Image (cartoon, rainbow, N blue to C red):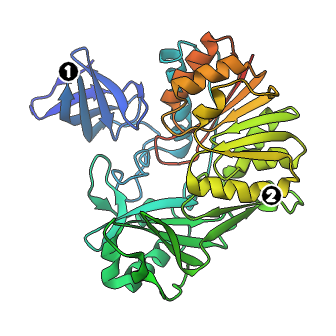
Amino acid sequence: MTRQTPDSSLVELVIERPVPGGHMLARLDGRIVFVSGAIPGERVRAVVTRRRGQVSWADTREVIEASPDRREPSGDARCGGAVYSHIAYGRQCALKGEVIRDAFRRIAKHPLERDVAVLPSPEEGYRLRARLHAQDGQMGFHLEGSHALCDADATGQLGPGAFEAVDRLRKTLGVNFGACTAIVVSENVAASQRVALCELKPDWDPGLFAGLPMVEGLTGVAVLAPRGMFTCTGQDQIVDEARVLLGLESDLRWTRQAASFFQGNRFLVGDLLRLVLAAAEGDHFVDLYSGIGLFAVALADRGARGLAVEGEAASGQDLSDNAGQCDGRLSVQHGPVEAVVASLPAQPPDVVVVDPPRTGLSPEVLEGLLLWKAPRLVYVSCDVATLARDAGRLLAGGYTLSGLEGLDMFPRTAHVECVAVFDA
């Protein structure tokens, strides 16, 4: 039961279940309330921060009946990347499994028969890539729902020494730090390389950063300006090796620029790659939204032939370079995925791998893939809601869901990576 408390600024709520985005669902007089800072099963007092129609949002102010899974967060739980920090880690993974299952029930209209396992990760030092926003001479993550900065280092996401190294760069830049809208720090899994990329405001000249001295803790510094990326000092590339990611005796490696996308968790990127390799069976594949070629290069390296498609410039350049290791088995196409799926391939692939952005597959890509009728589709997703939306369309188009697993690529956050396998 929920009721109004004598203090009219607070409401008393019983927390029911998790929802995407980090909030928990409760009800007040039959209306939905999305509550931050709570755990399912708890009774809390919360302040309503905003309303929209029949839905309200509220922040927990007092815990009346606490969950046994409640813990003291290390740092400000409102800081980006810490929204689940008040929850014991095992329960975090369980809640993310519930979010996946609920999304498939509500959005895909496909109730799952069993719980979804979410592969755990160490909670600290996991980030391979992070964007630190620059503001008023300081840098950090944003507080949830605002543009105010908070202490990124206190969230524990960055590897040892990463924040200190970038802070030394901030001090070295001096007044030129004001040219940066953000600094992106990127590392390899082995933590032997760390590059800082300053994203410049449009009216600043990257030439001001020429001759920058090497900064302790970094292996390179680059700037990203409207007309391209420029290396200031050291090396702007990061290299990951199959022997580190997969534990293989192999010369296979993936090289990427600091501006290129790469999976964010140093502890789970190898597990993600293994899951995709295990699911993507066949001699001929197509990899859409290929990025730098994490999946495509590994598939070609084990003997399959395929096509990798990437539309983003920096990642596409890295993809072409990395494909050079594959002895001609991997073709690369630069440009939008929609252009590729608009026509039937000359050779139907045995499997299609997709790893789209948070927005998921566009209607044009979904329509094209359904016409391709590939025997298997391996869908890597960083957004449960758009995965469930697209899954509903694939299931309605004749595919069956034969596998679904989660990976906790971002501990203490509400985000969860999924690998879904669909068979025709």
- Which residue type does callout 1 highlight? Gly
- Which residue type does callout 2 highlight? Gly
Instruction: Relative to 42, say whether 123 is above or below.
Output: below
Instruction: Relative to 140, say whether 221 is above or below.
Output: below
Q: Quadrant of the N terminus?
A: top left
Q: Nearer the viewer, residue 265 or 253?
A: 253
Kindly indicate the quadrant of the structure image that contains residue 250: bottom right
Point out residue 192 in the picture as x, y percentages from the top left corner: 67, 73
Q: Is residue 43 left or right of residue 266?
A: left
Residue at 45% of width from left, 65% of height from top?
A: 227
Query: In whole angstroms, how far apart are the C-alphas of marks 1 and 2?
Result: 55 Å
Kindly indicate the quadrant of the structure image that contains residue 331: top right
Residue at 22% of width from left, 28% of height from top?
A: 12
Q: Secondary structure at mark 1?
A: loop
Point out residue 240 in the picture as x, y percentages from the top left corner: 72, 62
Q: Quadrant of the C terminus?
A: top right
Point out residue 17 in the picture as x, y percentages from the top left corner: 42, 26
Kindly indicate the quadrant of the structure image that contains residue 305: top right
Circle on res. 53: 1
Residue at 39% of width from left, 78% of height from top?
A: 170
Q: Secondary structure at mark 2?
A: helix
Q: Nearer the viewer, residue 124 or 373?
A: 373
- Name the residue carrying label 2: 324
Comparing marks 1 and 2, which lies closer to the viewer? 2
How dense is the environment of label 1, judged by Cα within 10 Å: few (below 14), some, or many (20 and up)?
Answer: few
Residue 401 seen in this snapshot: no
Residue at 68% of width from left, 11% of height from top?
A: 398
Q: Nearer the viewer, residue 268 or 287?
A: 287
